[in-house]
Image (tube, helix red, strand yellow):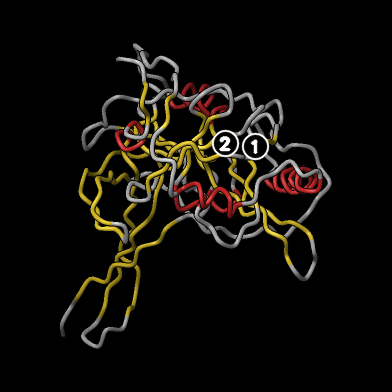
Amino acid sequence: MLLRLALASTILGLFLPSTSLLSAPPGVSQSGVIDDDAIVSHIEIEGTALIKAGKTVKLKTLRSQLQHAHTCALTLPESSPSEALTPSELYQQRASGVLVVGMLAKVKKTQRYELAGCSGFALTSDGVFVTNYHVVDNPDAETMVVMSRDGRITPATEVLAADKLSDVAILRAPGATFTPIPLAFDVPSPGSPIWVISHPDHNFFSLTTGTVSRHFIALTEAGRTPQMAITADFGIGSSGGPILDNKGQVTGMVCSTTSVYWEDAKGKVNDLQMVFKHCVPVGSIRGLLEISPKP
């Protein structure tokens, strides 16, 4: 019997819609306990209010800007940590810079806006953030809002820079006050520890850990591009989440998964063998910046 390995790639930019709408405040308590339903409700209610007030930008407008915004000039926070952080310190210091990127779409049956949540992180304190290109390039959503960990919600109104090949989009949410996460200058070598903070399937602000598996050239629909594989878990809804090194610097960004299946001689897929976790390396993010501080 002939054995073959079947590869199935999954882009993580299309997310499960919420099924509940609860009247609750933002769902992160002082002790750090997270109420996922409360976060979903908060984004849907506040996002709907922003839409009705005419304060949001249509996603089709942002999608059109993806084609024309190539690079942008930013002043980034200095990236010079001297000591490694414990996992607890890393989460405490960096979770505040991780954003919920909320794609809102009106459901015809209910005529209300529902959330499809994904991830992103702050680049500057004045409203500039980054997520995946494929997150923004979503024909099904009506608009995009972002929520910081303290519950503040702001519309995304402008694409500042974007690259489909590397799967990176840098956007602005005017009036937002973010806690930026510094970018590393180098990617860690295979075997180095890394951490991911993201929102898989509306499990908001989840921390996972692993190592860098390898650096490689990926063949995507847009062409060949450098990527980094890691062993830390992430899933649907994690797109745009930061990959952090042991000093809390962003060394990459969640991008996609590729699943390996066992396939028999007749081409029948029988079972899942392995899931590769692919990421955008930090150099692809820096490649869209015209100005950045020296190391």
| Residue 196 spot, x, y in % from top left | 43, 38
Q: Check the image and name the residue furthest to the right.
A: 23
Q: Which mark is residue 283?
A: none
Q: Is 7 on the left or on the right of 58, as rendered?
A: left
Going by the numbered disc 2, the residue's amino acid type is Leu
How far, Cα to Cα, is label 2 from label 1?
Answer: 6 Å
Query: Which residue is denoted by mark 1 in the rendering?
Result: 147
Are the two marked residues, 2 and 1, in contact with CB atoms closer than 8 angstroms?
yes
Residue 99 falls in image quadrant: top right
Q: Is residue 199 above or below residue 97?
A: below
Residue at 46 percent of width and 47 percent of height: 66
Q: Secondary structure at mark 1?
A: strand
Residue at 38 percent of width and 26 percent of height: 183
The C terminus, quarter of image? top left
Q: Nearer the viewer, residue 145 or 43?
A: 145
Query: Which residue is denoted by mark 2 in the rendering?
Result: 99
Residue at 65 percent of width and 37 percent of height: 147
